[in-house]
Amino acid sequence: MNPIRVVIVDDEQPARSRLRELLEDCRAELPHSVAGEAANGVEGLQVAASAEADVVLVDIHMPEMSGIEFARHLQVLERPPAVIFVTAHDQYAVEAFEVNALDYLTKPVRAVRLLAALKKAASGARPTRAVLESIDPAPRRHFSVAERGRVTLVPVSEVIYLRAELKYVTLRTRGREHLVEEALTQVEQEFGSVFVRIHRNCLVARRLIRGFERGAETEGDAGWSVVLEGLDERLPVSRRQWAQVKSLAG
Amino acid sequence: MQSIRQNHLPDALPDFRNLGVISRVLLSVNALALLFALARSREIGEFAVKVTEIAGSLEPVLLLVVVVLYTASALLERLAYAQGLVAVFAIVLAATAALFPLQSSLGGGDWRELAWNLGCAALGTGAVAWYFHLRNRAFSPAISEARLQALQARIRPHFLFNSLNAVLSLIRKDPKRAEGALEDLAELFRTVMADNRELITLREELSLCRQYLNLEQLRLGDRLRVDWRVDPAADEALVPPMVLQPLVENAVYHGIEPGIGPGLIEVRIERRSDRLWLQLTNPYHPDYQHRQGNHMALANIRERLQLHFDVEASLNTRIDDGRYEIGIAMPYRTSA
C-alpha cells in the first residue's frame, strides 16, 4: 500500500506544527507522508492540488476562506482528497459533522483520534456540496474552476455576469471568461443580494447595473437590454424579469 | 459562607460624590416636598403658595447638605453603615438649624416652627435613606448576576482550547516557553474565576490584558500587533475588574483573526483631571460580523460600569475609517 499523502491547512503556525508532531507519532501505525501545508484556504487549494493529497486536515475557522468553503472548492478537483475538519470549539459545526457522518477532530487533537480519522478517511466518502452548504449556509466568497489540475478561484465580487449555455455556465469577469459547474438557480439562492436574474439564462451583478437601453430588434420585438459597468456587451432583459429589474439602475 | 455572602452586598451609604447619587437625592427630596405641599393644600392656588413657601426654607438647606456630604464623603466612607447614617442625620439637622435664623429674619419664625422644620428634615432624610437602602438591596443580586454573566461571556472556550493547543505545540521544542504560557493561562483564569465585585487598580487590569495578549501572540505570531499608550498618571485608578480584557479579546477575535495579514490593536489610556479615558481600536472586518459574542461582552461591561459608577461612566462604540473603536469614560478614583 502506498503511504497516504496528507496536507495540513491551518492559519495558526503552532497548530500546524502540533499536527505534524502528532502525525509523526502515528507514522508507525499508519504509513503516510506530509505532502505540504498552508496557512489559508486559498493557498491550501493549490497545495492540495499540486501535492495530489489523499487527505486534507483543515481548520474550519480561518480568515478569508472558512474550512467549509475550502472543502467545497476541493470538490471541483478530478480526484478530490478526503477532508478531516479540525475545530477548537464550534458546537454548531460539531453537531453538523456528527449528523452528516463527516470526519472531524477537536483541538487539542489527540493522536489516537487522529489515527482513527486517518484510517477512516483514506477509504471514506467525500463530503457533498449539499452537506457542506447545510453546515455553513453563508455565501461563498469565491467561485472555483478546475483548470489543468489546478483550482482557479474567482472572487464573487469580480463576477459581472453568469450565463447558462447548453451544458455549462459561463462566468464573466472584466478580464476573462470561465466555465463553471454551477446551476443558476442555486447561485441565485446563495447570492440573492449580489446577483439579479435578468433572463431565464442569465444573472448579473446588481451593483454593476448602470442603466438600460432599447435593444436591437430580436424576433420582431425591441426589448430592453442592460448596461453593465466594465462590459461593452449588452445583455437582453426578458419581458418576464423587466418589471423587477428596471428599478435597479444605479 | 462565601456563597452566602455573595448574594447580598452589605448596606452602605451611597457615594455622595457621584452625580447620579446627587441627582437622586435632589429629585427625591423635591418630589417629597411637592407631595407634602399637595397634601396640605385644598385648592390649586394654595398649592402654588405652599410650594414657594416650602421651597424657600427647603432649598438652601438641601444645597448646603449636598455640599457638606460631597466634601465629607471620604470621611463618611470609613464609618460603618449605622454610624454613617447617624452622621448624615446629624448633618441634615445641623444644616436645618444653622439656616433657620436666615429664614426667620426673612419672615419670622419661632421655636415651634424650628421644631417643625427639624421634624420634616428628619422624616425626609429617613425616607431618602430608606430609598437608597432598597436600591442597594435591589442591585446586590444584580451585581452577582452580572458577575456570573461576565464569567460566561468573558474568555471564549475558543480561546482556551486554541491556547492549550498552542502550548502543546511548544512542549517538545521549547519547554521554557510552554511553562511561561501555562503560567499566564493560570493567572488569567485565576482572575476570571475570582469574586470580581471589588474595584481593582488599572495597573492590575493592564497586566491581565498583557498576559492574555502574550497567549494570543503565541498562536497568532506576527499577525497580532499591539500599540500601548498608557498615561502613567492613570496607573492607580480604580476600575471594575475585567473592564478591558474582554474588549481586548473581542479586538483579537473580530479584528485580528479574520485577517490574513498583520493587524494592529491600539490601546490609549489617559487621565484628564478627575476623568479616566480608555480607548481601544482594531481593524474592522464587515464580513465577519456574524461571529458571535461581541454584544454580550459590551452589554455586560456597560452594565457593570453603571453598577459601579451610575451615570458618571459611559461606553461608546463607532466605526471610523475601517477601524472599530470603543471609548470608555469613567470617574478617576483611587483607594488613597
Image (cartoon, rainbow, N blue to C red):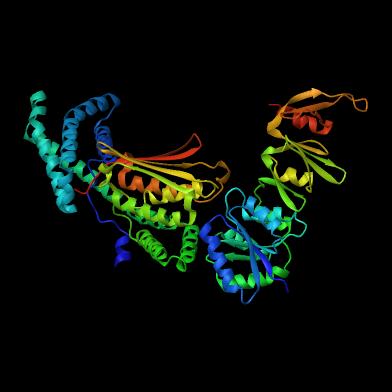
* Residue B16 relative to residue A61: left or right: left
Q: Find residue B158 and report its horizontal and vertical position in percent.
A: 50, 58
Q: Can residue B111 be seen in the rendering of this structure?
A: yes
A22 up-or-down from A183: above or below: below
Q: Quadrant of the C terminus of chain A?
A: top right
Nearer to us in this view, A194 or A17: A17
Q: Residue at x 43, y 57 (%)?
A: B215
Residue A49, image x and y in percent?
A: 71, 56
User: Which residue is more in the foreground, B137 or B152?
Assistant: B152
Residue A222 vertical position relative to residue A10 in the rendered view, above or below: above
Q: Residue furthest bottom?
A: A29
Quadrant of residue B197 within the rendered picture: bottom left
Q: Quadrant of the N terminus of chain A?
A: bottom right
The answer to whether residue B35 is left or right of residue A173 is left
Q: Position of residue A140 (x, y in %)?
A: 67, 47
Q: Position of residue A128 (x, y in %)?
A: 73, 58
Residue B43 vertical position relative to residue B181 in the rendered view, above or below = above
Quarter residue A2 falls in = bottom right
| Residue plotted at (51% across, 37% down) | B322
Q: Is residue B153 above or below residue A124?
A: above
Total count of labels: 0
